[in-house]
Amino acid sequence: MLELTPILQKDSGKPLYMQLADFIKQEIMNKHISPNEKLPSKRKLAEHLQISLNTVQSAYDQLCAEGYVESIPRKGLFVLTIDEEFRNRFDTEENKEKQKVEQAKPVKIDFNSGNVDSSYFPYTTWRKLSMQSIYEDQNFWFSNGDPQGEFNLREQIAKHLYATRGVNCHPDHIILGAGTQMLIGLIGLLIGRDKTYALENPGYHRIRVVLQDMGIKVLPISVEENGMNVSQLNESKANIAYVTPSHQFPYGMIMPITRRLELLKWAEKNGGYIIEDDYDGEYRYKGKPIPALQGLDKNNRIIYLGTFSKSLIPSLRISFAVLPKSLYSIYRKDFTVYKQTVSRMHQDTLYRFIKEGHWNSHLNKMRTLYRKKRQVLLQTIQHHLGGFVKVIGENAGLHIVLEVHTEWTETQLIEKALTCGVKVYPLSMYYFEKSYTGNPKVILGYGGLTDTEMEEGIGLLRSAWEIGSD
C-alpha cells in the first residue's frame, strides 16, 4: 500500500478531510505520488490513519471533483497526469512556503533518530574478515544456505544474548532476517492473521504498517510512565502485545520489573504472546543494562527481536527473532519454504566479528562515544533552550524527545527549523490518531551527528523558534 503519513491537526479549525485532500494534492504536485499510481482503499487508509471512513471518502471526493484523481469502477482511485504548466503554476500558500523553505535552506543538520556514527565503524577489521570468508570458503557461498540463517552466527548470537541481555535461547530457535519489518511479517504468518495485536501508542509506526498491510487487526494501547498500560491491555481483546520495554520508542522510558511481571501474567492468563523488540538495548547510560523481558519468562510466551542496525550500521540489514518452542515447531513444520533474506557472506563476516571479540570491543567503544554525545546534546540544550523545553527519554538509546513550551504547533516548529537548515521530526507520526494533547514535541536523534553539528543545530533551533527573544 502507498504509505501516506500526513500530520492531521484535529484542533486546527480546518476539517480533517480538507487537510488530507490538501496533503495528497501536495504530494501529487511535488511528484511524490506518480501519475497512474493507485491510492490506498478508503478502508485501508482510514485504518492506517485511524480516522473515520467518511473523512477519507470526503477527501477522495474532493480530489475527484478537482481533477487530481479519477475513480475506475471495481479497480479504485488513480492519480491523473497533471499538465506541467499547471504544475509550475501550483500556487497554494502552503506549497509556496514549503518551496521557499526547501530552496532557501538545504538541510544542513539532520537530527534523524535512525542514523549512527559510521565514522567509528571498524572498516579495516570488517574488510579483513570479509576477505577471509571469501578466500577460505569460495564456492561454499554460492548456494542458498539454511532458511534460518547460518548456524555458526546464530550460535554466537545466542551466547551474546545470554551473557549481555539475560536471554535464554538455543541457536535452533533463532531466525535471521533482513530487518525487523521482514521478521514481523514472518511472525504474523506464524501466529496467524486472525489474531489481534496490541501496540504501544505512541509506538514504532513501521511495525503497525506491516501488520495492517497483512490485514491483521491492531489496537492502540496507551503508554504510561512505566510503559504499556496493562489495565487497557487486559480490557482489550488482544492476543499479542508488541512492546519495547528496555527503551520505549519513542518516549524512551524503561519498563520496571513490576510492569514486566504484569505483562507476563497477562500473556499466561490469556494464552497470548509478547513480542519484545530490543532494538537498542545495548545503549543505556545510567546504571547497568536492563535484562531482557524474555529472561523472566517461564511459560514460553515471549518472541524476542534484536537488530544490528543501531550497534553496527543500518545498511547491514541483519536482524533476528528468538522464537518460543511452540512457534518454532510451527516454523519448522510450515515455513522453512521461505528462503533466507540475509547475504551468507555478510552472515559469516559477522560471525567472525563476534567470535574474535571485535563485537564486544566495538560496543564498549560506541557506548562511551554515545554517552559523550548525549552529554554534549543535553548541555547544549540547557544552555540555548533552558527553561523553554523539557527533555524526555534521555537515559538510553540514540534519541530524545523535546517538549517545547510554545504557542506554535508541532508542524510550525518543524517548518521553522527547516528555514534554518535543521531537520527535526514529529512525535505525532507515532500515534495512531496522528495527534496528541499538550505542548508540541519533536524527536532529536544524535547518533549520526558530531559535537559541533549538535551545538550548531541547537543554536539554530533557538533562533528559528525565537526562544529567549522579546
Image: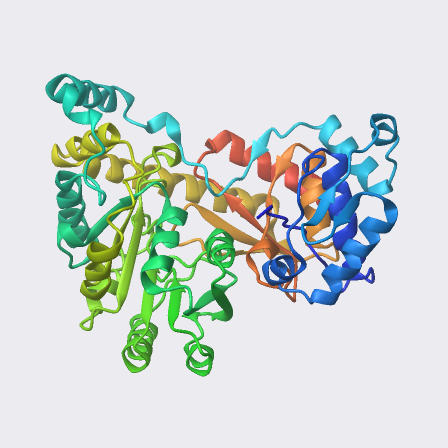
Question: Which residue is painted at 25% across and 56% down in the image?
Answer: 334
Q: Where residue 271 sits in the image (x, y, percent)?
A: 29, 77
Instruction: Locate residue 192: give its quadrant.
Output: bottom left
Question: Which residue is painted at 41% across and 77% down in the image?
Answer: 230
Q: Where residue 437 sits in the image (x, y, percent)?
A: 65, 67
Q: Where residue 235 sits in the image (x, y, percent)?
A: 46, 83
Instruction: Locate residue 31: give its quadrant.
Output: top right
Question: Which residue is painted at 73% across and 46% down in the image?
Answer: 24
In the displayed structure image, the side of residue 420 where residue 324 appears, left or right: left
**Is 440 above or below relative to 313?**
below
Can residue 437 be spotted in the picture?
Answer: yes
**Is 259 above or below relative to 58?**
below
Q: Where residue 312 sits in the image (x, y, percent)?
A: 32, 35
Instruction: Locate residue 10: give its quadrant.
Output: bottom right
In the displayed structure image, the side of residue 399 where residue 182 appears, left or right: left
- Tell which of 18 and 70 is nearer to you: 70
Residue farthest front in this picture: 74
**Is 266 above or below relative to 200?**
below
